[in-house]
Image: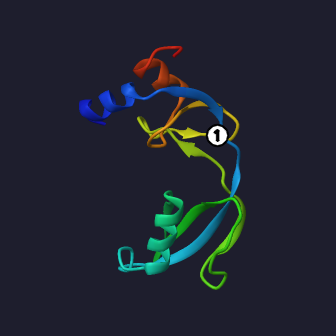
Amino acid sequence: MNEEELAELRGYKWMPSRIPTIDALSTFVPEGQEDSDSAVAGMRARVGFSRWYPVAGGHKVLFPYEGGGHDEERFTVEPNGRDHEHCTVCGANIAPMTECWVTQSGRYRVLCEPCHSALVGPTQ
């Protein structure tokens, strides 16, 4: 992250959190169709988050899923498919129910404990 991005993070109000494992909607996006898949673009617009995993011939894409309608021919529910978060600063995996820090409002961000301490201080 550059200094401008770090300064933006310092300006947020943070609260401690423990993020649970949740289900995921899973789909496959063939290689070369990453930017033209309307179902994936629609889900990304609705949910806001996705994880892309390279697999043979394309990507497995996971979206957080906490219920609601979806195209059952295109997406399958993967129980406990969202089993970690990533620190916004260092990218470290944050295991479920591990204490971390999330933004209180505005753009959703997650910090691991070491990055929160280094960026904001031990408490806020």
Q: Which residue is drawn at 42% across and 29% down?
A: 12
Q: Does residue 96 appear left or right of residue 44 in this picture?
A: right
Q: Does residue 117 appear left or right of residue 33 in this picture?
A: right
The image position of residue 46, as x and y in percent, is 52, 65
Question: How was this image coloured?
Answer: rainbow
Q: Residue furthest right?
A: 79
Q: How crowded is mark 1: few (under 14 residues within 10 Å), some or many (20 or more)?
A: some
Q: Residue at x 50, y 57 (%)?
A: 49
Q: Which residue is drawn at 33% across and 32% down?
A: 8
Q: Of 51 and 47, which appears nearest the observer? A: 47
Q: Does residue 119 appear left or right of residue 82 in this picture?
A: left
Q: Of 55 and 27, which appears nearest the observer? A: 27
Q: In which quarter of the image is the N terminus?
A: top left
Q: In this view, does 66 lie above or below 70?
A: above
Q: Residue at x 66, y 50 (%)?
A: 83
Q: Residue furthest bottom?
A: 73
The image position of residue 48, as x and y in percent, is 49, 58
Please tell me in which quadrant of the rendered image residue 107 appears.
top left
Q: Of 30 and 102, which appears nearest the observer? A: 102
Q: In this view, does 43 lie above or below 97?
A: below
Numbered disc total: 1
Residue at numbered disc 1 = 95
Residue 56 seen from this side: no
Q: Is residue 36 above or below residue 124?
A: below
| Secondary structure of the residue carrying numbered label 1 | loop
Question: What amino acid type is highlighted by mark number 1?
Answer: Ala
